[in-house]
Image (tube, rainbow, N blue to C red):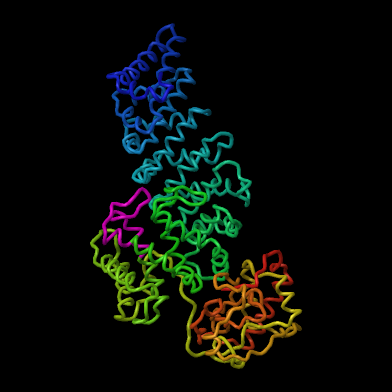
Amino acid sequence: LSNADANDGALLGTPGLVEALGRVIVTSLRVYEVEDRKSAAATTVTNGCLALMNLSIAKQNKHLVFQTPGVMDALMLVTRSAAPLKEARIKACSALSNLAIGYDNKIPMFRYPGFVDAILGVIRSDEGEARIKACSILWSFAAEMRNQVPVVQRGDILPTLVQVAATDTQTEARFKCVAALTLLAESLPNALPLLPALTPLMDILSDAGPDPTQWKGQTASWCVGFLMNMAQADDAVPHLRDAGVVQLLAPLLTLDHYQSLKAAMAVTFVCRYDEDDETYDLLRKTETVIPKIINLLHNTLSARGGSGYKYGVFTLRSSVGCIQSLASGPDFMKERMATGPVYDSLLRVVSDFCVESTPGAIVGGGVEDAASPTLAVRALHSLTGHLIPHPGDPFPYGKRMEGRLIKALRGFETSSHPELRNSDRMLARDARRLLQGEGQVHANVHANVNAPCFQEDIRIEKVESGGELGPGCCCDIPDIPRFSASTFVESVQRVVGATTHHTQARRKSLNRSPTPTNISPLNYASSQHSASTASTNNTRPQGATISDPVRTFLLSDENGRRFAVPIDPSGGRVFNDARVWCYRRGRYCKEEERPDEGFRWTGALQAAYEIAVARLRASGEMEGVVTTTRSY
């Protein structure tokens, strides 16, 4: 009767029926152990567990069955029995797994006396389906955020999960345990205790290969999620870097696949404190994934899923934290972040916390989630300082949003929430004052908090001009070299589509003052435009769009200033494109925008640039990449 869903109401509505099933299981199990009628007793125990398994399938039934007196004790007795009742044990574990899925059951089942010990006993002693169901129960416990820290603090669950993930290559038990470990990593206090899981999960991902379309099952996907969650904990980042997480995830960054979203978020978190050339290259690689990251934030706030994921897979803190890390990065990344939709989403996160005081959702947010609005305020601080470099400059997204921002920032600034830091309140104050034109923003306040903190490129008003080139373009320097027709065709056939990976030794050699070589100077035409004329007359030929990035690498001068230069000397620009390149921003200037005058191009830099490009071509690192003739 219990096999038919339509009977659930009548069966559960029959007074005493579910409780009687529990008593029958216990009685029959005792009969099996002490009398000769083992066959009949075994069948009764199995059928009783099967009936409870069926009745616990429907969502609306789970809490009712769990609360029925005697049910939990009966099912636990079967799991602990030494009797060779394989089918009964499988059915009992299946029923318990069904009950653990129930949202209202996750916490009380985890706390039920003796239950976790019984489940761990099954995992240690069984090698079949019962073990898989027992691992599913641990997965369900980890899915409840309020369970995550207590699960790890118990001390016996985590080693079991790691052991199964590392050794079980034959069953779905590994998948269940990897999923549980990934969910446990959502809670930042668990990061350091979870480090023993790092090596086995990285091994699983490495064995799966760099092509997600060839992965079997979902285990490797959960491993990427584990690395993404772990990377959000400051204490875990050095361990992830040392373990080679960035190198493992790098091949996923440029793929048009759901895994590239998680990989890009993980790499962004891991690299958020780094400012070296390798990090710059990695951030350039993540540019294609930025729209997906932004869309993830929008979808999370709208309680909907996206391409490849369902709502609830990502916490709000994950998407806001990734936006914050990117917003604290180089200027080219700030510009990709400082959009109206991003501001609107960040504003909503802060407003839900301290203005509307909403109750939040399963993914976080609202008045009880201090972490997400803190990250949002840090992002708003970085982006507002970028959009409004001087107090009193206009906010580009309208007075209405400006007023809402000021209100939300003031609310955060005056909030008495115990988890907020005064340093973050100061960031909210500084961003608010900048919007109101009251004073300079304290750009370095965030350096003393546990937040991602890329520093902006060094700006200096005066530089030693070791042979400046004549006036013409960015910072009174010529345009990015314009080639003759033959040279331009050759450049189009090479790279621009992706950044290059160099060893540190090569980077150091490229960044030194160049030594005399036999490389011929590049053939470029002289520009007839002054800096002021070019910056206000940014006409683009048809086919050139402002949204397509030009791939760049960093070139340092003698003073340590880092110039962002295009990998392709054409800058991805067609021959009749007169836009102006800015070496600080690493892109062409937009309309009404001037290049940074602190970055002046010199003959020494030009020579070093030519050597760098020649070496890249000779090494083959510029081959095999899609070339574009457009830039942003």
Q: Is residue 187 left or right of residue 586?
A: left
Image quarter where the C terminus lies is: bottom right
Q: Residue at x 72, y 67 (%)?
A: 620
> Measured from the top left, where is residue 607 in percent x and y?
67, 84
Q: Residue furthest top?
A: 36
Q: Residue at x 38, y 28 (%)?
A: 56
> Measured from the top left, where is residue 36 in percent x and y?
44, 6
Stretch in magenta: 350-376
> Measured from the top left, where is residue 169 in percent x and y?
58, 37
Count of numbered circles in the view = 0
Could you say which quadrant of the image residue 298 lies in? bottom left
> Measured from the top left, where is residue 62 in percent x and y?
35, 31
Q: Nearer the viewer, residue 113 or 63?
A: 63
Q: Is residue 90 above or below residue 174?
A: above
Q: Nearer the viewer, residue 1 or 316?
A: 1
Image quarter where the N terminus lies is: top left
| Residue 179 belongs to the span the image colors magenta | no
| Residue 374 belongs to the span the image colors magenta | yes
Q: Is residue 69 above or below residue 243?
A: above
Q: Is residue 513 above or below residue 101?
A: below
